Image (tube, rainbow, N blue to C red):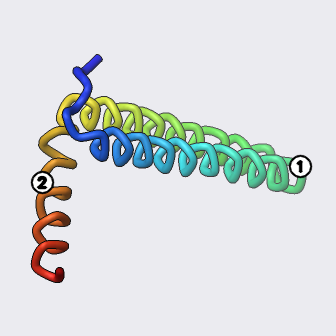
Amino acid sequence: MAARSADPRIEVMYRNDCRAAYGILAVLWLVFGFVYAVTAGNSDSGVAFALLIGGSLVLLFNTASILAMTSHYAGDKQQIYGLDLRYQDANKRRLA
């Protein structure tokens, strides 16, 4: 686990990004489940099997990529979000 950041805004941005990523991943799983449930009963067993294999691979790789992304963000959040915040603060000073 990475050390906590000095700027609390970094933690907030990181948590929001994780929530969004996991939320989108959950929606992907729900959509696949719905499509499979609707399609599997109304199609040939070969089509249902192909959908199951293809969809499972998509879910596997997308889940792995989201987990890897959030893990990478946790380790480098100071660099990733610190740059965003630096430019946000500079823009606020410029506009004030």
Q: Dot 2, how many residues are within 10 Å of its Cα: few (below 14), some (14-19), or many (20+)?
A: few
Residue under the point 10% across and 68% down: 90
Label whose residue precedes the other's in the sequence (2 or 1): 1
Find the residue positioned furthest to the front: 96
Q: In the image, 55: left or right of 35?
A: left
User: What residue is pinned by disc 1?
Assistant: 41
Name the kind of residue labelled 1 in the image. Gly
Q: Count all numbered tags in the image, as a single digit.
A: 2
The answer to which quarter of the image holds residue 67 is top left
User: What residue is pinned by disc 2?
Assistant: 83
**As displayed, is residue 24 above or below residue 70?**
below
Q: In the image, 84: left or right of 15?
A: left
Residue 64: x %, y % from top left: 41, 33
Residue under the point 49% across and 50% down: 20
Numbered disc in front, either 2 or 1:
2
- Toward the viewer: 33 or 55? 33
- Toward the viewer: 87 or 77? 87
Query: Looking at the figure, which quarter contains the N terminus?
Result: top left
